[in-house]
Image (cartoon, rainbow, N blue to C red):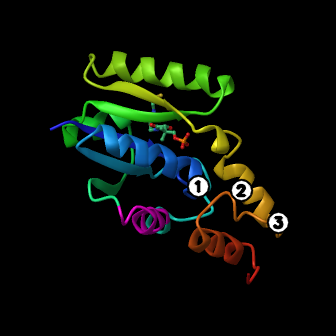
Amino acid sequence: MKAAVYPGSFDPVTYGHLDIIRRAAEIFDELTVSVLNNKIKTPLFSVEERVKMLEEATRDLPNVRIDSFSGLLIDYARKQDIHVAIRGLRAITDFEYELQIAQTNRKFSDGELDTMFLTTSLEYAYLSSSTVKEIASFNGDISQCVPEFVAKSIYAKYGYDR
Ligand code: PNS
């Protein structure tokens, strides 16, 4: 069975992430989408909230499971017996950072964890969780960026009822 992990902050999940999830789920038998519990960043949503949103957004994908992790991705992947990490590439600006992480993970896992990049579909190439949050924080329209139930949760965090 071919398994992969798609790690990320997912704070919150966007249509860009969901595009990558759908496409990776077609390539692999099982895809684990895992939310990083990062003590350094201050997220808008708790890990539990992010996991719940991902579960809701991927309900129609039977081979996708949602999990969370803390610490190093290589340690998590080893415990799960997963040897491929999925990452989305939106633009050349993502590339250098992603290349460095992919090479670090490969090196420090003794070749056990490789990274596979999927290029984000053009219609979502501009999207990031950060810009979605910024637009929502000013009560702007984010309906093209995230599913409706996610948008509602983001607006609620900023005190808007819409
Ligand atoms: O959605 P993000 O914030 O771009 O995801 C980054 C993520 C979670 C893939 C990356 O920060 C990560 O894997 N963090 C766990 C710690 C780790 O293994 N770092 C890589 C070696 S420097």
Q: Is residue 3 magenta?
A: no
Q: CA distance from mark 3 to mark 1?
A: 16 Å
11, 126: nearer the viewer: 126
Classify residue 58 as left or right of residue 19: left
Circle number at residue 140 = 3
Q: Which residue is mark 1?
A: 14
Q: Position of residue 132 (x, y in %)?
A: 71, 56
Above/below status of 68 relative to 98:
below
Q: Position of residue 121 (x, y in %)?
A: 58, 39
Query: Residue visible at 78% across and 66% down?
Result: 141
Q: Which residue is mark 2?
A: 132
The crowd level at tag 2 (other Cα within 10 Å; few <14, some 14-19, many 20+) is: many
- Mostly what secondary structure, the magenta segment? helix
> Do residues under tags 1 and 2 come within 8 Å of each other at their CB atoms?
yes
Of marks 1 and 2, which one's residue comes earlier in the chain? 1
Q: Is residue 55 magenta?
A: yes
Quadrant where the image shows the N terminus: top left
Of marks 3 and 1, which one's residue comes earlier in the chain? 1
Mark 2: amino acid: Val
Quadrant where the image shows the C terminus: bottom right
